Image (cartoon, rainbow, N blue to C red):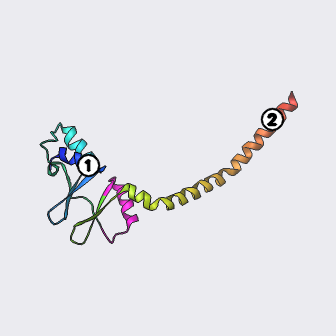
Amino acid sequence: MTVFDAVAAMKAKNYGCIVITDMAGRVEGIVTERDIMFKLVGQNGDPTTVTLAQIMTRDIRMARETDNVVDWLRIMSNERFRRLPVVDSEGRLQALLTQGDFVSYTWPDLLHQASGLAKATILGQLHYIVIAVLVFALALVALTTLT
């Protein structure tokens, strides 16, 4: 498939990538928006003649159906990739997880942690706030007494 045809399909379905598989459905690589920008547009390639096979990223990281989702979130974050094919024991594509999927999956936990961190930060700084208010009040009293 040419990049031109792939981009048309990606646009129609609002996809950010295409996973390349062999005839048996085993993952061979992936073409992302970044691949198209850097390997085609950035090289002045012709999307009507360049094929996905020419610009796809090979040897990509893949998760198994039985892997821990949170472990993969950490790996994706550390290694800076946003799309993760999930394959069965024969390497056949079963699903594609994105960082957005992980955010949806972990959102309640993240909100809880952020709330706890905000409370701890505010409580940890509370004595500074009280001191600042007292100093301000004393300064106001001193100013009104002097005038």
Report the number of discs.
Answer: 2
Distance from Cα at disc 2 to Cα at disc 1: 65 Å
* Mark 2, secondary structure of its residue: helix
Q: Is residue 72 magenta?
A: yes
Location of residue 91 in the rendering, given as x and y in whole percent from the top left corner: 22, 67
Q: Residue furthest top?
A: 147
* Mark 1, secondary structure of its residue: helix
According to the picture, the residue beneath numbered tag 2 turns out to be: 140
Residue located at (26% from left, 49% from top): 10
According to the picture, the residue beneath numbered tag 1 turns out to be: 10
For marks 2 and 1, give the one nearer the viewer. 1
Give the residue type at disc 2.
Leu
Location of residue 83 in the rendering, given as x and y in whole percent from the top left corner: 31, 56
Position of 52 relative to 21 (above/below) = above
Q: Residue furthest front?
A: 12
- Callout 2 crowding tier (Cα within 10 Å): few <14, some 14–19, many ≥20: few
Residue located at (33% from left, 54% from top): 82
Location of residue 64 in the rendering, given as x and y in whole percent from the top left corner: 29, 68
Q: Residue furthest left?
A: 49
Location of residue 141 in the rendering, given as x and y in whole percent from the top left corner: 84, 36
14 left or right, relative to 53: right
Residue located at (62% from left, 55% from top): 119
Residue located at (85% from left, 31% from top): 144
Task: Return the residue nearer the eye: 130 or 57.
Answer: 57
Task: Return the residue nearer the eye: 57 or 3.
Answer: 3
Q: Quadrant of residue 106?
A: bottom left
Span highlighted in magenta in the image: 64-83
Q: Quadrant of the C terminus?
A: top right
First along the sequence among labels 2 and 1: 1
Give the residue type at disc 1.
Met
Q: Is residue 75 magenta?
A: yes
